[in-house]
Structure formats: structure tokens, C-alpha cells
Image: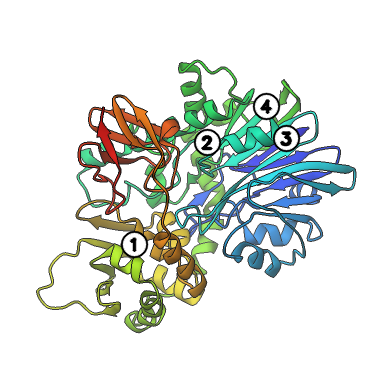
């Protein structure tokens, strides 16, 4: 098996049966905020795109690059389709001209046939509303000699299923770095923000190491992050100036974390690096010395920023103008969604303010209406400051997902009083009838928490109340606080109260 890094979460996997192109991302994403790091524009994309199979893990724009897929990828490639509850990924690929689909079943081993014969695959599909834009996934590929698990930024809750289907994993490709707007955009004191960032940074790497231990692969390739921020107003988000609260550590940082914890199987790959893998044997070649990137990362980013300046300017020129009232368009978009999502609206539980330039619009979730502020209403418990042109653009483009556009761009500010509200961000990623119906139904579905596990002198329910991770594997107890390292959520063990968000109580007792 030959595995070529094509940047970020992207890989080209060549087997005797045929080639699989995974998650190719080249063009700036999220309102031109994110750019692949290191630079991958010099690769031979027409050759890489002449693939036999295409795998797009999910619809996040750093995995689903519509422009690149349309221009450079073979439309006759057989698409390996994750088993998602909402068919948005297939629809978007069909719009681009892809017409051959192999519909997988979640966590079921399949054999697919390419021009050179058969290859075994399995796609682990995650279906919770918090997983990507209604779905995230990881791909296993085995050619009979080598097995690769391309987990990208999926967070599976059960690793046993992959070992039962494939046995030992030879190569593990996984996310380890930040891909979120927290805590950078929040209106909180700088020292507090740094402390939250340090926690977020370390928890992300701890979670990745937990997956490494569970998968037990011979070789581990840190991938799916971080992006690089080249716009002047976002440059401080790069981890190139000694900011201990930065949530975007790069590959070199995580490889050092692996070494500190006794794992010598880490492999650095940059765009164009090729790993020839035969079971436990791996031979690696780079297109150039990686020191060009990492020896002076800030200088490398500065050179990238100069090259990409015209690209970012052209992208910004496509945004809608800031003029025009937003009250009525937002009312037309949000109110029908509110009226069919009682559980989510009740879970949010309070009015939310959208400050857009000089105007404020209130999303009144208890009343299921979008309205102007009421005199004397005061500061809202949750609120967002967003440039009007960004809101006009997502409305113009009929975006079904503000999380995958505005929020991941980090081009906004937020405040909140109290904990994170998962229901609110779920609402913003489910702005279609189909999505909101699925999400509302998912939250209302009863989950079995009868199984228990013991951790550090406590008996707790085995499945995390958030997204059902196995707490015997992902749970960490410090004093009277339980942290689930899958997403970093925390609980007070004495009371069972969730310290991260509203609801989600934990069953626990001291032994």
C-alpha cells in the first residue's frame, strides 16, 4: 500500500485494486479564514484526481472542497459513501457531477472492486447532531497485506468494531489539533482565555493519544490539522509566536507529545510525502526537507500570506454587501425551524442576541419568534456579534449550516453567561426541515445508561451522557470532577451535574 499525503486530512491511498482519494482540500474555506497547512497547491492535482475511488468523510469545508472536486477529480470515480441519516453529502456530490456511489453500511466490512481487483473497506459513520454537519466518519482500507485507518477528525466511540473486522491496524491517520472557535472569539479576560486555551490544547492532544492507545497501530500519522490563518486580522491564531493558549498545535508538537509518552511510532508527512507500507514495514520519502516549514514556521507562514493575498482578496469580493434589513430574512429562515423543534428550542431556553453592525435581532427561542429587542431587555445570556455582510452572504447562498460557515471562520465575537449550550449550536447547523427533524428526534430518543464502570473510587454510568462515549476508556477523574476526553465535557461527581452544558446529568456514586 502506498499512502501519499495531499495536505490537511487529505490522502491518496494506492492499492493493487485501485487508488482512493480521501478528503482533498486546497481552496481557502470558512470565509477565506482557513488555508491548508503546509501549502499543497503545488501538487499534481489532475494526476491525484484521476482516482478510482473517492472518499469524502463529511461536509466540513476543509474536507469537502466543492471547487476542487469539480475541477480536478474524476467524475467516474466510485464514491465510497458513509451511512448518514440525512443524504446531504450525496446530494452535494451529485451536484458536482459524481454519479457512481457505493452506499456503505455503518461499521460493516465491504469488498469493493477496482480496475486491479478487490479491496476491503469499512466506514465508521457517526450520526449525532454534534458530529460534523450531521455526520462524520472514518475509513478503513485493507489490501490483504496492510490495513490503514483514516480517522481524520472523526471521534468514534467504539474501537472494538474495527479490530473485530480487520485485526491489527498498521497505519493510523488522525486529527490531534484544534478545529473550533473556542475560546478565541469569546468576550472574556485575556488571562482567562489563555487558561481555557491551554486546557483545550492539551485535551485535544490527550484525546488523540487515547485513540492511539485504543487503535494500537504500528504507525501514527498526525493529520487533519491545523489550518493556517493568512488574513491579517486572524494571523494571531497561528501557533507560531509562543502563545501557550493557542489551540492549533502543529504536527511537530504532537509528535513530541507522543515521544514524551513513550510512543516512537509517529510519522511526519507533509503534502507530497509518500509512505510505502507493507504490514509493519514503512519507508518514507518527502518532496523536500520539512525543515523548510518547521525550522522557522513564522517566516514560512509570512511567505504563504504573501502568495495567497490575491486569492483571499478575490474570495472576499464574492461576499454580499452589508446593506439591507436583516430582520425579515432572518425571521423567514429561523421561525419555521423553531416551530418544528420544540426540544431544541426548550433546550436553548432563552432569547439569543445577534448584533450585526448597528442592528440587533433577537432569536426568542422560548416564544419561537425572531424579533427586535424589547426596551430594558438587558444583556442576553448568549449572543453573537457578526458583520452584516457575512449574514447577508449565508442568506444569499441559502446555507443550511452557520457552524460550517460563519462560526468556523472565527470572524465573529461571542459572549455567554453560564455554560456551553449544545442545543444552540445544533440549531445553527440544522437550518433545513430535514436536518432539524433529525436532530430534534435524536435528542428526544431515550438512551440506555444502565451499564456502569468504576473510575478512581467512583461508580459511574459507562456511557457519556453527551455522545455516549465509553467512559471506561475516555473518562478521567480528578478529585470530584469527571472529564470525558472525547469532547472535553465535565461533570461534578457528587451531584451528577454537567459543568459544561445545560442538562446531560450523570449517574454517579462514591464507592
Q: Are marks 1 and 3 in contact (CB under 8 Å)?
A: no
The quadrant of the image that shows the N terminus is: top right
How far is the residue under mark 4 from the one under mark 1? 40 Å
Q: Earlier in the sequence, mark 3 or mark 4?
A: 3
Q: Give coordinates of residue 262: x percent, y percent.
A: 50, 15
**Which picture quadrant has residue 390?**
bottom left
Q: Give coordinates of residue 145: x percent, y percent.
A: 79, 28
* Front of the two marks 4 and 2: 4
Q: Earlier in the sequence, mark 3 or mark 2?
A: 3
How far is the residue under mark 4 from the one under mark 2? 38 Å
**Mark 1 Cα-neighbour bin, 10 Å: few <14, some 14–19, many ≥20:** some
The residue that disc 4 covers is: 168
**Disc 1, SS:** helix
Q: Are marks 3 and 2 in contact (CB under 8 Å)?
A: no
The residue that disc 2 covers is: 300
How far is the residue under mark 3 from the one under mark 2? 25 Å
Q: Is residue 462 left or right of residue 222?
A: left
In the rendered view, tell whether residue 484 sits above or below residue 66: above
Nearer to the camera, 264 or 127? 127
The residue that disc 1 covers is: 424
**Mark 4 Cα-neighbour bin, 10 Å: few <14, some 14–19, many ≥20:** some
**Mark 3 Cα-neighbour bin, 10 Å: few <14, some 14–19, many ≥20:** many
Q: Give coordinates of residue 305: x percent, y percent.
A: 51, 46
Q: Give coordinates of residue 81: x percent, y percent.
A: 68, 56
In the rendered view, tell whether residue 239 sits above or below residue 217: below
In this rendering, does residue 299 appear at all?
yes
Q: Which residue does the image show at 20% across and 37% down from the upper left? A: 494
Q: Which residue does the image show at 79% across and 56% down from the upper left? A: 77
The residue that disc 3 covers is: 3
The quadrant of the image that shows the C terminus is: top left
* Front of the two marks 4 and 1: 4
Q: Earlier in the sequence, mark 4 or mark 2?
A: 4
Amino acid at each position: 500500500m502506498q499512502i501519499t499525503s495531499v495536505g490537511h486530512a487529505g490522502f491518496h491511498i494506492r492499492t493493487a485494486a485501485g487508488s482512493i482519494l480521501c478528503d482533498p482540500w486546497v481552496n481557502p474555506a470558512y470565509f477565506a479564514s482557513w488555508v491548508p497547512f503546509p501549502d499543497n497547491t503545488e501538487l499534481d492535482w489532475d494526476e491525484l484526481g484521476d482516482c478510482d475511488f473517492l472518499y469524502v468523510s463529511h461536509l466540513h469545508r476543509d474536507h469537502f472542497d466543492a471547487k476542487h472536486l469539480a475541477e480536478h477529480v474524476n467524475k467516474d470515480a466510485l464514491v465510497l459513501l458513509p451511512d448518514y441519516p440525512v443524504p446531504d453529502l450525496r446530494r452535494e456530490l451529485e451536484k458536482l457531477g459524481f454519479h457512481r456511489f457505493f452506499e456503505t453500511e455503518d461499521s460493516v466490512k465491504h469488498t469493493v472492486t477496482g480496475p486491479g481487483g478487490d479491496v476491503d473497506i469499512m466506514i465508521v459513520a457517526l450520526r449525532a447532531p454534534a458530529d460534523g454537519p450531521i455526520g462524520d466518519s472514518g475509513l478503513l482500507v485493507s489490501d490483504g497485506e496492510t490495513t490503514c485507518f483514516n480517522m481524520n477528525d472523526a471521534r468514534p466511540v467504539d474501537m472494538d468494531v474495527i479490530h473485530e473486522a480487520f485485526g491489527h491496524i498498521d497505519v493510523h491517520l488522525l486529527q490531534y489539533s484544534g478545529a473550533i472557535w473556542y475560546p478565541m472569539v469569546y468576550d472574556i479576560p485575556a488571562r482567562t482565555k489563555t487558561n481555557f486555551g491551554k486546557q483545550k490544547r492539551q485535551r485535544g492532544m490527550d484525546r488523540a493519544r487515547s485513540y492511539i492507545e485504543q487503535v494500537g497501530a504500528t504507525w501514527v500519522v498526525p493529520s487533519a490539522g491545523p489550518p493556517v490563518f493568512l488574513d491579517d486580522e486572524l494571523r494571531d491564531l497561528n501557533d507560531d509566536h509562543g502563545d501557550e493558549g493557542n489551540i492549533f498545535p502543529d504536527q511537530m508538537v504532537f509528535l513530541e507529545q507522543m515521544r514524551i509518552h513513550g510512543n516512537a511510532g509517529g510519522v511526519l508527512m507533509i503534502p507530497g510525502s509518500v509512505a510505502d507500507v507493507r504490514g509493519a514495514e514503512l519507508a518514507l520519502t518527502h518532496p523536500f526537507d520539512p525543515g523548510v516549514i518547521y525550522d522557522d514556521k513564522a517566516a514560512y507562514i509570512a511567505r504563504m500570506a504573501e502568495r495567497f493575498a490575491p486569492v483571499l482578496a478575490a474570495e472576499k469580493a464574492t461576499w454580499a454587501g452589508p446593506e439591507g434589513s436583516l430582520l425579515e430574512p432572518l425571521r423567514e429562515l429561523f421561525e419555521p425551524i423553531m416551530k418544528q423543534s420544540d426540544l431544541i428550542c426548550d433546550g436553548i431556553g432563552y432569547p439569543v442576541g445577534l448584533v450585526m453592525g448597528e442592528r440587533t435581532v433577537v432569536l426568542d427561542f422560548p416564544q419561537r419568534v425572531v424579533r427586535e429587542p424589547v426596551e430594558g431587555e438587558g444583556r442576553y445570556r448568549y449572543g453573537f456579534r457578526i458583520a452584516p455582510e457575512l449574514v447577508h452572504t449565508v442568506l444569499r447562498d441559502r446555507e443550511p449550516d452557520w457552524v460550517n460557515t460563519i462560526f468556523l471562520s472565527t470572524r465573529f465575537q461571542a459572549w455567554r453567561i453560564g455554560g456551553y449550550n449544545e442545543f444552540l449550536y445544533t440549531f445553527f447547523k440544522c437550518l433545513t426541515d430535514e436536518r432539524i427533524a433529525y436532530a430534534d428526534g435524536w435528542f428526544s430518543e431515550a438512551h440506555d445508561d444502565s451499564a456502569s464502570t468504576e473510575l478512581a473510587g467512583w461508580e459511574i454510568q459507562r456511557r457519556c451522557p453527551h455522545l455516549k462515549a465509553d467512559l471506561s476508556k475516555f473518562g478521567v477523574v480528578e478529585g470530584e470532577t469527571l472529564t470525558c476526553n472525547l469532547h472535553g465535557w465535565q461533570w461534578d461527581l457528587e451531584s451528577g451535574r454537567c459543568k459544561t452544558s445545560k442538562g446531560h446529568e450523570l449517574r454517579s456514586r462514591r464507592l
